[in-house]
Amino acid sequence: MKNRIEHIGDATLYLGDCLEILPTLGKVDAVVTDPPYGIGFKWTGAARGGRGPGLKWKGPPHNHQPAWSDIVGDDLTFDPSLWLSFPQVILWGGNNYAGMPAARGWLVWDKRRDTTPDHHGDAELAWTNIDSVIRIHRQLWRGIVREGAENVANGGKHHPTQKPEALMRWCVEMTSGAVIDPFMGSGTTGVACAKLGRKFIGIEIEERYFNIACKRIEEAYRQGDLFVEPPKKAEQMELVG
């Protein structure tokens, strides 16, 4: 896989490993992300760390990931310490990671919206270091029943752990300055930034999702909000190394 950089409007998108790319970047004001780590793990009861230390891979031996795994990284534990050093952080699934410092606020995504309970979970939580009371975003999201642009009937599902555009826009609006999503997936955070006129840096290790993200973000600029300037023409470069 060749690393790539795409420039679309005020978005700079990197195809590659975020741990390798991050040291090459300048100052970034805010991290808004939903790490994929731990989805492929099976609970061993070794600890209460959720997706953090204590979970052990119980699948077949592998060099990178099992063949049936949905996304790169979901068979690995996650160390959140690198991302917690940023001035503003919104980390979805932060309640599942061991060793997290005390949150200065929690964001709640209520996926039921007054419907019956869902065996996949009625809500998801995001850890944040932004001073805040507990805030709740309500948007129905149960299997193929989804409110908003991502309704499956409209072809809106692009990634196994995709978050609603409205949810990520809600998150971005709580931050200021340039936003980075080091686990960009299909680019929903970037779409939100494009529509809000915010600078965005996205990093994605899987080319199939990177290509989807590029297309979605370019389309978001094309549609735009009234206060967003038209994007510059997309440019493509190859990273050396």
Image (cartoon, grey):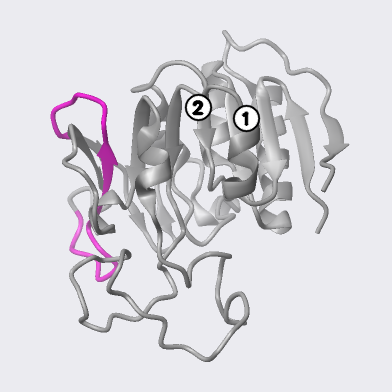
Looking at the picture, does residue 85 appear above or below residue 152? Answer: above
Judged from this view, the residue extending furthest toward the bottom is: 60
The front one of 153 and 234 is 234
Q: Quadrant of residue 55?
A: bottom left
- Name the secondary structure under disc 1: loop
* Magenta extent: 115-135
- Residue tagged by mark 2? 179
Residue type at mark 1: give it.
Answer: Leu
The front one of 85 and 172 is 85
**Residue density around tag 1, few if under 14, some if 14–19, many if 20 or more, within 10 Å:** few
Q: Main secondary structure of the magenta part?
A: loop
Q: Indicate left or right for 99 with 236 as reference.
A: left
Residue type at mark 2: give it.
Answer: Val
The front one of 201 and 136 is 201
Q: Indicate left or right for 17 with 139 as reference.
A: right
Q: Quadrant of residue 29?
A: top left
Residue 49: % across, % down: 23, 65
Could you tell me if residue 137 is visible in this image? yes
Residue 65: % across, % down: 58, 76
Figure disc tally? 2
Mark sitting on residue 25? 1
Q: CA distance from mark 1 to mark 2?
A: 12 Å
Assess whether residue 201 is covered by the magenta stretch: no
Q: Quadrant of the N terminus?
A: bottom right
Looking at the picture, does residue 208 appear above or below residue 234? Answer: below
Tell me, yes or no, whether the two marked residues, 1 and 2, touch with CB atoms within 8 Å. no
